Amino acid sequence: MGPSFPSVQSFYSREISTAAEKDEESQSTPRKPGDGFTEEELADAVDPLRRKWDPEREYDECSIDNLIPGPKAVTFVGRIANLSTIHGSTQKQPKAAGWHYLILKDDTAAISIKLYFSSGQYPLKLGQLLSIWTIFISDAAKANTTAIQGVLACANLFPGRVTSDHVMIHTNSATDSICRTPLTYQRGRPLQGLITLDSYLGSGGHDGVVGVKILVCVKSIGPKKRISKKTGGECDLAEVMLFDNTGDIRWTLWGETIESAKDWQPGKTILLISNPGYRVEAHSQKGSIGVQQATMVDVDPEFPDAEWLRKFAVGVTKKESLCVEFPGDVFNEDVIDGAEYGVNRIMFRLAEIDDWVRNNPSHSFTGHVNITIMEMSLVKLRTRGMLLCNECCGVPIYANELEIPCKNCSKSLKLYLNPKIIGMLIDETGCITPGKLLWSERAWEQLLGRTVKEVTEMTNEEIRWLEQRMMFMRMHLVFGWEESVGRLAILGMRA
Ligand SMILES: [Zn+2]
């Protein structure tokens, strides 16, 4: 180390490197023989310290169940199943600014890790794949932590200070399929300890049963909130709603764990939570769950139950979704042209459409229908600030403006006219309840006689007038059905 680096601290505190430096550094990333990754995959991994690391010794590649307590240079990979961060130095590591408590698991076993940092904390998230290099493994039974089922070993690492320790965060999609199998899973057998949310909540399944597991899908992710603690100071929390086919439950995330949730997708991300903490809550019958020291979270685990829940979630999400974005790829200009002017224009009644869809949902078709507007909610929804809507992070978002940032992920969202401005529609054979149709922007323009933007700019008076004019209006709609869309799409309006 030359004179330009007066202390280890200042060298390692260099957290942001330029692209060129990063390139050069990643190219020189050492590849240990047999570590299971290609040069390229390792180059795509993030070294949180951004240091050159050229160990002289050879590290044996191990699966976690093969880690033997004692001194030995080993390297292993695993996904983060539990994560919490403590700030401040400890007696053992006075130079540390804090440490992360981690449980890392592969397909064979789990290990608990104390990962010390000297300046900034590592950008860790639940579910991330890490490669670890260390020269000492401790026996979990002898460490002064409470025993956790499945955790046999533990390790203390301080990569910023100890040159034989190293950690890499894998970000490449090539490593996506690694370490996704739940612990103790055996092909063809049900996963031990796995119960439904219904039995977890209802029959006291949560009550101190070691090894209890729930498999859930993320329903929604709430915004980050800052609250003051009873013990002084402030902390951040975010609430994530989870569901399976039997029920739903709230999960409160604290501190840095909130970052993990930002990558999760409502209706898609599946979590296997082992040994969740359960909290009775005064204002809700259900209580909520949280992460305790013995909790393990598998993000998008791979086994048949997870596959089943993934499919179930897709169906439920589609049914419950506001579904306001018009699928322009399915009903493109050619389809719309054909529906409006083609030779196979068929006039339907509502009962007939219902029959067609029920009896043969996979059969796509377009047609025309004559209906009457029985209700309008244009004035009401605008007064409530719900003229337009969209969904983000699994949460419906309403406003009277065309664009608004999501409160949770801050992403700017384009909003669509709330389909519920049109109330009940009827013909002599049936009715369509509000919000069930999927309107194209063009169909809205034809119906309302102005662009969506112009609707948002109308005065109260003009809105009231428009609503009155449309009540009991009889109209001729061009519609399309496609199973993947799952709703009747309104392609246009004919005079
Ligand atoms: Zn969002």
Image (cartoon, rainbow, N blue to C red):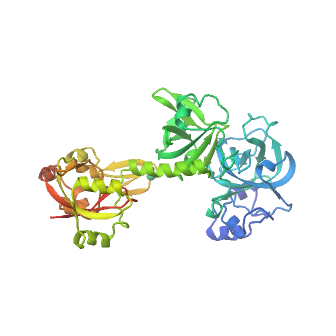
Outermost residue to the front = 359
Q: Nearer the viewer, residue 71 or 365?
A: 365
Q: Toward which corner of the image does residue 173 lie, by quadrant?
A: bottom right
Q: Position of residue 295 (x, y in %)?
A: 64, 39
Asked whether, in this view, residue 440 is left or right of residue 116, the answer is: left
Q: Position of residue 107 (x, y in %)?
A: 71, 51
Q: Residue at x 55, y 28 (%)?
A: 203
Q: Nearer the viewer, residue 155 or 180?
A: 180
Q: Position of residue 190 (x, y in %)?
A: 64, 43
Q: Toward which corner of the image does residue 189 lie, by quadrant?
A: top right
The quadrant of the image that shows the N terminus is bottom right
Q: Residue at x 29, y 53 (%)?
A: 354
Q: Toward which corner of the image does residue 277 lie, by quadrant?
A: top right
Q: Does residue 404 show up?
A: yes
The quadrant of the image that shows the C terminus is bottom left
- The vertical placement of 332 against 202, above or below, is below
- The vertical placement of 154 against 74, above or below, is above
Asked whether, in this view, residue 470 is left or right of residue 254, the answer is: left
Q: Nearer the viewer, residue 421 or 301?
A: 301
Q: Residue at x 13, y 54 (%)?
A: 473
Q: Residue at x 72, y 67 (%)?
A: 38
Q: Does residue 487 show up?
A: no
Q: Position of residue 413 (x, y in %)?
A: 38, 56
Q: Give the total of numbered labels.
A: 0
Asked whether, in this view, residue 67 is left or right of residue 37, the answer is: right
- The vertical placement of 475 against 431, above or below, is below
